[in-house]
Image: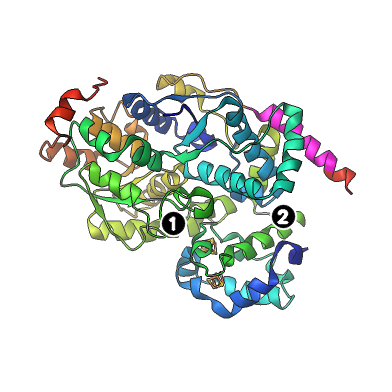
Amino acid sequence: MLGAALNIKLLEMCSKCGACYSICPSCVNLPGYDPREVIQDIVAGDWEKWLLSKSIWQCLECHYCLEMCYQHYGFENAMTAMRAVATKRGIFPVQVKRGWEMFAKTGKLGEPAMPARKKMNLPAPAASGGEELKKIYALLKEKRRGQG
Amino acid sequence: MKDFAVFWGCTIQARFPFLEKSTRMVLDAFKLPHRDVDGFTCCPEKSLVNNVDHAAFVLTAARNVALVDGMGLDIVSPCTGCVSNLATVKGELKANPVERTAVNGLLKAAGKEFKGNAKLTHLVPFFHDSVGVFAIKQRIKKDFSGMRLAVHYGCHMMRPSHALRNDDPLDPKKFDNLLAALGAVSLQHPTKLQCCGQGLDRVDQHDNALHMARVKLKELKSLGADGLVLCCPSCFLQFDNNQFLMEKEGEKFGIPIIYFTELLGLALGYTAEELGMNSHRVDVEPFLEKWKRSPLVAGSGTIDEALNAVVAF
Ligand code: SF4
Ligand code: SF4
């Protein structure tokens, strides 16, 4: 599952490099956050233990490592892949779950604040495409089911 | 200039309508051909949607781009996340014909097709490149000479660079240039390009989010910054709202947070109240007070240009 989403060859190089540790905002500011450890475990095939860890949610997706990386790969790819596996197994931070549910229901993460708009003389907000999105998302799910 | 749709995104409209207000004011002041378009959804937000279902992330962004593709419009957004997410998917689909065909197969049911023709630009590089520093300077009624302001780009203004291609991803210049055009000193500070850390609030790690905000605010306080200028609702939430929460607990930083559109709007002669700055949670008065006391320096176009400039109000 994880192998399909990741280029293990690049991660092997990455586990020997570690260069972007010193510019990663979470590595610098959050004690205990160290993607190098996660990547070593991915390369060794021993990554399951990370699924429940807070660490995989501490990657801010800031893309700094991606930009710095001589392989243009980055810690980030490993962390993103770990999160994708975690959510497939139903492991979510509460807010991610709530956000996802709101998105799936409305196609948005919040509705325009109407009373404040009125007070500020803002025009009526444009119509949402939420309903249409829901329809094509349903088609996507149908297609997936068809593919088993 | 090609007409463009403003992509407001969820956060500004749901939580910070005053940022919509100031954005509209500066777009109108420069008579820029903007419009609202029916049918957009969430961009979608990456950490929430992509982590759960990558295909849904791609489909949603592709549909938003297809909507403006069909109308022959570009997109400009005052949210860095929106532009970055839309551009990431646009880049992915342009590079992957198989995926693009699959996505278009689904979009067809809604009468749409992703072509990827629409240009997607964040408001800051847009003002820098399409309006231009010179046109801005001509219109300034009072600039920010003598003010020490820190600029916070926000990661997604220029990253990922392969998708956005609008500035140096590790040493961007455009926001600084705009600040310089407005007469301010752009303070160089160690955390200038460091992620704001707001993402941590979205994954149940509020204390870590506060910690990241604190690191930056402390630094700015020690440098004597008069304010922090940014142009991303997520960064705004992090430094305005979270700073306020820390102040309530007795940690005082006193760093006013100024949206780029507010700074520009003030320079053009709008009042802080008109721009909705009284809706901020951290007091902006110290910034406004200092600015009021500073000497009047107007825009710096040549006399001919100043005479020929279009005056909007
Ligand atoms: S994307 Fe994640 S791992 Fe990479 S530098 Fe940013 S926080 Fe660190
Ligand atoms: S992501 Fe790239 S730069 Fe960072 S440690 Fe891995 S190989 Fe090195």
Labelled disc at residue A87 = 2
For the C terminus of chain B, the image quarter is top left
Residue at 57 percent across and 36 percent down: it is: B117
Q: Is residue A138 left or right of residue A65?
A: right
- Residue A137 in magenta stretch: yes
Q: Is residue B233 left or right of residue B88?
A: left
Amino acid type, mark 1: Pro
User: Is residue B7 visible in the rendered structure shown here?
Assistant: no
What element does badge 2 sit on? helix
Q: Are dots 1 and 2 on a single chain? A: no
Along the line of sight, the residue nearer the viewer: B221 or B13: B13
Query: Which residue lies at the image location 32% right of the left edge and 50% below the top edge?
Result: B151
- The quarter of the displayed image where residue A50 is located: bottom right
Look at the image and give the residue range highlighted in magenta. Answer: A129-143
Magenta segment includes B185:
no
Residue A32: x and y, percent? 54, 72
Rendered position, B128 above or below B159: above
Circles 1 and 2: CB distance less than 8 Å? no
- Where residue B222 appears, as percent x and y from the top left, is 25, 60
The part of the image, by quadrant, that contains residue B100 is: top right
> Quarter of the picture for ligand 2?
bottom right
Residue B41 pos. (x, y %): 61, 33
Label 2 is found on which chain of the structure? A
Classed neighbour count for the residue bearing mark 1: other residues with Cα under 10 Å, few (<14), some (14–19), many (≥20)? many
Count the marks. 2
Give the residue at mark 1. Answer: B169
Q: Is residue B13 above or below residue B92?
A: above
- Amino acid type shown at disc 2: Thr
The nearer-to-camera label among 1 and 2 is 1
